[in-house]
Image (cartoon, helix red, strand yellow):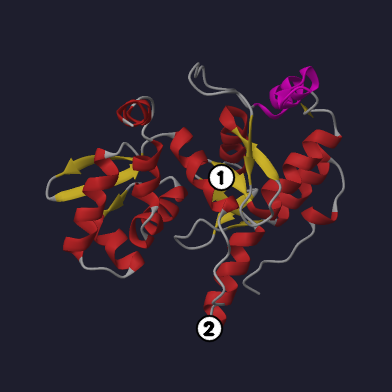
Amino acid sequence: MNNNRDAHAEGPDLAALAGLLADNTRAGFCLALLDGRAWTATELARHVGVAASTASEHLNLLVAGGLLAQERQGRHRYVRLADPATAELIENLASMAPLRATPPHSLPAVNRSRALARARTCYDHLAGALGVAITTAMTDRGLLDWEHGLTLTGNGTAWLNELGITLPADKRRPPVRSCLDWTERRPHLAGTVGAAVCRHAFDPDWITQIGTSRAVVLTDTGQRALRDHLGPSDDWSVTDPRS
């Protein structure tokens, strides 16, 4: 009996990590922080509808547990997801979680939900139907290969160079990584390549952010660019989900 307890005490404490997310408030904080920004405790409290003191208690647990990093500027406390690996963990868990049965009740809420499903940022890469479509198109053109795990092909490297995309020398993060999309339930592209493609899409206004949310919309310029660089597709001819 004691030997069993000792065996369970060894190794990673997965139950402790799971316990950090086994709370609607803390889970809501982590999902909100998938936008890649640093939020104040007050902003997060308002976002999930809890008191500031309650938010502070939950944030302390998330920081102590290593899921969030924090910094202070004057009287303000800012928190963000600890790193890209944490963001991918949250997104992957979200893809496995059951969808909430209660639908949005107002037209603005319905539009926000549709916009997030259509195209959004997942920390620093593109997700939603648009992110999945770009990943599929890159695969179809031979820029990505899945045969022995996801890899960037030689043609993929040349394609990035043609676009003027330079990858950062980040040895800790894989160049490409598959991230299961929680709305599409299909993979979208993450890793340093996914992040670089997302940054590039923002720079020439291929995509623009909708308000302060994670949702983005593909512009007319973006539609033409994706047709030019990834070939024709119905996924590049979409209307603004807010309309």
Residue 138 lies left or right of residue 197; in this view the side is right
**Residue position for label 2:** 106
Residue at x-position 62% and y-position 72%:
242
Observer-nearest of 117 and 54: 54
Q: Is residue 135 above or below residue 168?
A: below
The CA distance from mark 2 to mark 1 is 28 Å
Residue 104 lies left or right of residue 69; in this view the side is right
Q: Is residue 229 above or below residue 221?
A: above
Q: Which residues are magenta?
A: 148-164
Image spot of residue 156 (x, y percent): 75, 24
Instruction: Kindly identify the amino acid type of the residue bearing the numbered disc 2.
Output: Ser
Observer-nearest of 77 and 227: 77
Residue 150 shown in magenta? yes
Q: Quadrant of residue 196?
A: top right
Residue 7 lies left or right of residue 51; in this view the side is right
Q: Is residue 10 above or below residue 93?
A: above
**Residue position for label 1:** 92
Image spot of residue 47 (x, y percent): 35, 65
Image spot of residue 54 (x, y percent): 20, 62
Q: Is residue 78 visible?
A: no
Question: Residue reaching furthest bottom?
Answer: 106
The numbered mark, 2 or 1, whose residue comes first in the sequence reads 1
